[in-house]
Image (cartoon, helix red, strand yellow):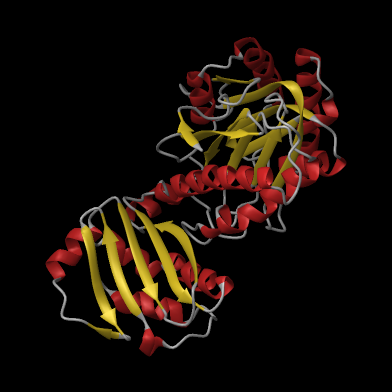
Amino acid sequence: MEVIKGGVTAAKGFRAAAAAMGIKYENRTDMAMIYSEKPCKVAGVFTTNVVKAAPVKWDREVVESGVKSQVVIVNSGIANACTGAEGMQSCRETAKKAAEVLEVDPSGVLIGSTGVIGMPLPNEKLKAGVEVLAGKLGGASEQGTQAAKAIMTTDTREKEVAVCLEIGGKKVTIGGMAKGSGMIHPNMCTMLAFVTTDAAISRKALRKALQKDVQDTFNMISVDGDTSTNDTLLLLANGMAKNEKIRCNTAEYKKFVEALHYVNETLAKKMAGDGEGATALFEAKIVGAKTKEQAKVLAKSIVCSNLTKAAIAGHDANWGRILCAMGYSGAVFDPEKVDLYFESAAGKLQIIQDGVALDFSEERATGILSCPEVTVTADIKEGTAQAAAWGCDLTHKYIEINADYRS
């Protein structure tokens, strides 16, 4: 596998565009389109929140119907959530307009929205945006980047990644883009993510790969403990690489899954590191666990702890907060066996051994915790299983952003 430049336009046959339509924001792009020259098989994973936005309901129907898709239309600024029948009508009108302009099947048009909950979408602007976007579609890397920027809300930077690999003697590419900064929590985090591939793959294999991998990537990040109404992850495969079709549990499938995992994990970590007001990506690793599930529960509890996140923001090696978060996680372990380490580009330092603090240098610990990417590793010495979760520090800026989010 090779990491390459690009995002959703990296795979063969995919194009993208961005436009400024004044949905809510002024003087910035706020609509994006992804288009495939060939109809795509689609897999999707959506929010577990009982309150689901209209685009989530719409896309779930598309994915579950098995219809092939060629276009995804996304807007930022307004979430089209808690908008009732009007919200679903907006999806229908947007899909109908896309079908007219692009000559595609309206039942396969995919839609994403992100932004303020409860506000109605300006449908005329959306439909005008579809026409504008259709006229600007292109397959250049920069057009994929512009699309990634257009779906941002409180994000400070675009999030995209692409890889290529060889399957059956053919070059296969997977690329993706995502947005997410606030309302991010495990069991689908607050996000929109779109992954494209030119791989020829069975629908069963595509869905299995995505649904399994999300458990170790997007479901292992948290910024603020709030699960969104709009979480949507879509994976589109157009088969234009012309490899022999990938089927479940084959060697080719395993190669595809590994590459997809890299794309998903990279996008997930980019979201965690760009949490609202964040200054650092915070990774929690549990090693020496009896089971992977035990390790996942412990890792998630650490990155979800507000006290731990505040300590990371202050570059304070307050290890007691970490052990405390592990203790209330619900996972059973022996705290008197735990070894704990802090690590970053500035080095690695053991903080506790067998549940007791070592005589470590506070100055060195502060230096390690002052880097933009910080890892805490807890060895619970019970087995060989391990897991990682990702979050960010908690700063005053988070409150500033969310105290007046609607304005």
Q: Is residue 40 above or below residue 307?
A: above
Furthest toward the top, the residue is 135
Q: Is residue 200 shown left or right of residue 382? A: right
Q: Is residue 235 above or below residue 320?
A: above
Residue 66: percent from left, percent from top = 85, 39
- Whether residue 226 is visible to the viewer of this picture, yes or no, is no
Residue 353: percent from left, percent from top = 28, 82
Q: Residue at x 70, y 23 (%)?
A: 240
Along the viewing direction, whichever of 223 and 66 lies nearer the viewer: 66
Residue 403: percent from left, percent from top = 43, 51
- Whether residue 60 is visible to the viewer of this picture, yes or no, is yes
Residue 128: percent from left, percent from top = 68, 16
Q: Residue at x 39, y 54 (%)?
A: 399
Q: Is residue 234 above or below residue 93?
A: below
Q: Is residue 4 shown left or right of residue 394? A: right
Q: Is residue 282 shown left or right of residue 257? A: left
Along the viewing direction, whichever of 10 and 126 lies nearer the viewer: 10
